[in-house]
Image (tube, rainbow, N blue to C red):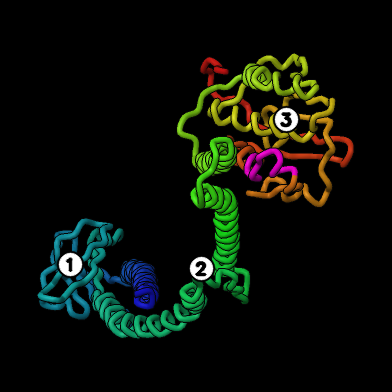
Amino acid sequence: MKVNRVRTLRARLVLWTMLVNALLLVFLCGLAWVVLRQLQSRQLDDILQLSAAQLASAVDVTGGQLSIPAGDTEILTARGVFVWLLDSTNRINATIGRSKGLSAPALDIGTIRDFQLGPGDNVRLFHARLAESGGSIIVGVSLQSLVQTDQIFVLALGIAVPLVLLLSAAGGLFLAGRALAPITAITAQARRIHHDNLSERLALGGPRDEVHDLAQTFDEMLDRLQSSFEAERRFTADASHELRTPLSLLKAQISLALSHPRDAETLIRMISAMNDDVDRMTRLVQNLLALARSEAPLDTRQPVELNGLLQDLIQQLQAIADQRHISLALEESPQAGAVITGDAEQLARLFMNLLDNAIKYIGDGSGNVQVRIAPSEGKRCAGWVTSIADSGAGIAPEYLPHLFDRFYRADPARARHTGGAGLGLSIAQAIAKQHEGYITVSSQPGHGSVFKVWLPARTGNAAPKK
């Protein structure tokens, strides 16, 4: 089917080439015909006027009778000119050439007109006055040369158009084959690429033209597809691994509980462990659902006031922070009107994940988490930047590039202790991108970390909501 489409495209290119060339040929021939007709017509007018002027100076008047010298008659006849010589009463006194035996046509003095003397006998006439004798002359020439010109052009078109169409078809097939050869190669290569060998690329060589740009764009699309496929495979494998561990523990606890009778205290302890495993799986499933939702387009957008949103979240976490002797506060800022447009629930999840992480990784000792809102005027994201700085242990530089990857944990032992699955930062980054923003992080071991959330400013004039 794809090959047939390419052949159809080639046929269309050939047909269009033939049509354009034929129309161009007809246009050029028509233009040449018009120009040549005008030149010939002007030449005939000049012959008529020149012959009339020559006769006006050569006509003899003898006894009131007009006559034309024999020498002038021969010259005019050689030119193909015929003449009626009329006296003052419009009576024919003499004729030259084919006008002999024909009555003089009615024609105004000084007028040039075309007449038909007989079937297919078209002529052009010019009527001029003889000032001295009071008579006039009618000079005429045949229009056969114009007819011959028309016939020559019709014959030329009849020969040239089929020849041009034939040459256009041959040239069009050749050029279409050359032009579509890369397309054919792209089609064949694309047909060989599937999910098991997404690493293959077109790598089309040749000049940098539109087809080369198409192939390069296709390769870039394959790069993105390969990255997406690999990310999904890793995600599936990691999710399976994360679910398999608590499921295996739960299965082992159940098998152990059923293996032989237990006392109530032992059963309660085993059920409590099972409950912990179920809670872990529940949190993981909830995080997976949250991640899926954060990667979908926003259903609704409404103004969200950042100061109020962060104050509410800090109040929710204040008890945990106090219990761990951690100072958690939103820095007083003149930016009370920091408003963005988005989903308040999703944004709350984003900041809650970051604040919760900051508190968890400070540990049980004293420390502080400082939140600050400031305007952002960068080209990438003009709006507001929210900084969440903690005084924790910090993050090693080698971990920073992967910090927002799914299921990535810089310290797996600590993550298991805190119940994390490595999805919190991935969800936060996905929500930021969902709101056309992004998150950056800077950290030094032993000096804490600073997470910055860059979000665009609010659009519209709706009333803000917390």
**Residue 413 located left or right of residue 133:** right
Q: Which residues are magenta?
A: 414-424
Relative depth, front residue between 69 and 75 = 75
Q: CA distance from mark 2 to mark 3?
A: 42 Å
- Residue 172 visible in the displayed image: yes
Q: CA distance from mark 1 to mark 3?
A: 85 Å
Give me the residue at 64% from left, 49% from top: 407
- Tell me the number on the disc at residue 249: none
Residue 422 belongs to magenta span: yes
Q: CA distance from mark 1 to mark 2?
A: 83 Å
Residue 355 image point, x, y percent: 70, 29
Q: Element at badge 2? A: loop
Residue furthest right as drawn: 446
Q: Which residue is mark 2?
A: 195
Q: Which residue is mark 1?
A: 115
Looking at the rendered structure, the kind of residue marked 1 is Phe
Q: Earlier in the sequence, mark 1 or mark 3?
A: 1
Q: Earlier in the sequence, mark 1 or mark 2?
A: 1
| Residue density around tag 1, few if under 14, some if 14–19, many if 20 or more, within 10 Å | some
